[in-house]
Image (cartoon, rainbow, N blue to C red):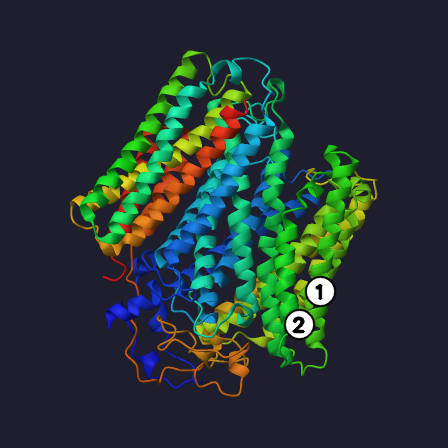
Amino acid sequence: MSQTDVATLEVHSATGLPSRKILMWAFIGSECMLFGSLIITYLVYRGKSIVGPYPEELLNIPFITVTTFVLLMSSLMMVLALSAVQRGDMKWGKVWLLMTAVFGMVFLGGQVYEFTHFVHEGLTLQTNLFGGSFFLLTGTHGAHVTVGVIWLLSLFFMGVRGRLTQASAETVEIAGLYWHFVDVVWIVLFTLIYLLS
Amino acid sequence: MAVTGAVGAETPGVGAQDHGGTYSGGIWSWLTTVDHKRIGVMYGVSAFLFFLVGGIEALLIRLQLGTPENTLINPDLYNQLFTMHGTTMVFLAIMPLSAAFFNFIVPLQIGARDVAFPRLNAFSFWVFFLGALFMNSSFLFGGAPDAGWFGYANLTSTQYSPGMRVDFWVLGLLVLGVSSIAAALNFIVTIINLRCEGMHFMRMPLFTWMTLITSFLLVMAFPAITVGLVLLMFDRMFGTQFFNPLAGGDVLLWQHLFWIFGHPEVYILLLPGLGMVSEIIPVFSRKPLFGYAFVVYSGVLIAFLGFGVWAHHMFAVGLGPVANTVFAAATMLIAIPTGVKIFNWIATLWGGSLRLKTPLYFCLGFIAMFIIGGLSGVMHASAAADLQQTDTYFIVAHIHYVLFGGVMFALFAGMYYWIPKVTGRMLSDRLGKIHFWIMLVSFNLTFFPQHFLGLHGMPRRTFTYESGLGFEAMNLMSTVGALLLGSSMLIFIWNVLQMLRKGPPTGADPWGGSTLEWSIASPPPHYNFKVLPKVYGRDPLWAADTSDSRPGDDVEAPEPHMPGPSAFPLTTAIGIVVMAAGGLTTTLPVLFVGVAVVLFGVYGWAFQPLEH
């Protein structure tokens, strides 16, 4: 009895879609507006700094291309992880989850390196408008990646303790939605900040 | 969870004398509740308290302005009062009062047992409540925010606003944004996914529709102000230059970000009230709503257009004739869907068998006042006229005709209509009508003269005015009106207290309503519907065969199990406010404690089974 009744809240669905998935999509919609506002701020202030260092002196496109590639590969790992969990192949499910998180951490490591390098070159939050808007925009993205890494590692450790099963495929799928969204945002940022600089 | 047997045994139509079922239990059961009805009650009570706080701030402002060159309130305190009056009424009174109705009414109207995410719902309430206390605690620590509710840059920079006042405002609004977005996401999913069988979108009650639209507006509009506030916070705390003109920063960026949020916010405040009026007028006219689809689509159109008009708040900053013309035209366009709604309400009343009860009184008052507010709005939609009116009392008159004459009249209509469902007792109709007439007359006495004050050139946000400018009589009128307006609230409070003490019990359906919330006992049992209803059209309770829509409590069915209480939403909310306090005082240990509490709350929440 309790199963079906709780089910009226958790599984009842007028659309046939799980509520949690709709929640994540609506959240992603809201996040688009958040990143949209930050991107607009960056673009409004592009070329408005009155003291250096300026973007063209600092941005290292080959280096960021490599970390961008790593982040894109992590999306592939995420797809493989979900597919393994959906098949009930928990061994590979855990492997791919861990790999996704590790690739995410490599990207974050690249960002830490880039930030420290910029600070050494004299660009801080306070230096000019480029510093403020660049660090805020990419830093917000980095914070999102960090949350994603923590989420993926939590799923991985659930798997290690045997609490992740084929039935949790939806949980992994929702984490995946978030992860792919964060990757897509980076593609936009990479294009606007680095390629069009 | 404690379950009452009394509610189940009661026959529909006879009021429950023992209201223990839904609301019984000690303070701990309220702190950990995930029941949408209890959360709705907590939203309603706390929002009304903040409404009174904001009202007292307004009365102090009016007392100061009652006579020329008055020294009752010094300029510094005056700045704090008008800033906190605006901030409190928008974020701590009207929005959460609407949220109270979303919580209590929407799940009942769509035939659901709770919202889609009951613990997220509790979290939204606690973040709102603690965030509101955080913001108001500024009065105790060196003064409240004093840069206006719009917080224009660079008035808010550390150069012009040293100290913690603006920091309280920035962090408080960031915290409240978390609450609003979480609640809006929850209601989007609830309305999309928990509709009962047969409740297609075009059969949903209007209030549920407007809640859905409002939730989408919240989710889309709040990120813009969040980014604005983060930029401001970085300027103030980490020394960035976003709003520093000397470093190339653009102070207008703040205005754009604020009003891209701020104009949709007007519709976030307004649309729930429009939904309530669209529910109440048909019930008291004994007629289905005229042009249901038109009312729904005009709501959608208002929301859509609401994102394209923000710069009409910025006509005076010099965006240029092209931008001003485009935004003026878009603003005037909004009058069309709004007018459509007004005609639909009038057409619903037309030829109906009207029952002139208090809720309908407030709806009629709403229509009249809202038309006045709408007309003055169309006046300053014209950029040329706006240049004469901007920053004068004309604008103050306009926004109060829209937000008090419009939204608050509608919210009071909603309160008189739905409070019997919440408490199971009737409010006095006689006291309600006395409240209505005093409120209507004193409201107009307060704000109608302000149109003329504005056109005569009296600037807003100025703590006094010289005598001999011709402002005295109308300011005095306005102050007397405001005091009367405040006292009309006492009648409402008295009415509610009398109702709680000895109000006659209401049946399940005291008004002959058409929507599902009237099919179950008042107050509803904690599981709402023993058997989930089925509907076959709009106005299910008015349809000929209501057997499926009115299953009642005498149906033979096991009592549904509901999600158990949880302390983790409150824990997480406390963590967020501790983080804000750490940011405010720039003490890293406090900030880290806050982060740790949030992590503890989130993990506890994620791993706690829903039913336990």
In this view, B208 is above or below B74: below
In this view, B352 is above or below A81: below
Res. B179 mark = none
- Amino acid type, callout 2: Gly
Q: Dots 2 and 1: beta carbons under 8 Å?
A: yes
In this view, A24 is above or below B21: above
Q: Which subunit holds the residue at mark 2?
A: B
| Residue B448 x %, y % | 76, 55
The residue positioned 59% from the left and 52% from the top of the image is: B55
Q: Earlier in the sequence, mark 2 or mark 1?
A: 2
Q: Which subunit holds the residue at mark 1?
A: B
Residue furthest out toward the bottom: B544
- Amino acid type, callout 1: Val
| Residue B519 x %, y % | 46, 79
Query: Residue B287's image quarter?
Result: bottom right
Q: Is residue B146 left or right of residue A19?
A: right
The residue positioned 29% from the left and 66% from the top of the image is: A6
Circle 1 residue: B340
Circle 2 residue: B291
Q: Is residue B95 left or right of residue A87?
A: right
Structural crowding at the residue carrying mark 2, measured as other residues with C-alpha within 10 Å and reported as few (<14), some (14–19) or many (≥20)? some
**Quadrant position of the N terminus of chain B in the picture:** bottom left
Q: Is residue B245 left or right of residue B211?
A: right
Residue B69 in view (yes/no): yes
Q: Element type at marker 2?
A: loop
| Residue B597 x %, y % | 30, 41
The residue positioned 62% from the left and 60% from the top of the image is: B299
**C-alpha distance separating marks 2 and 1:** 10 Å
Residue nearest the viewer, comparing B591 with A134: A134
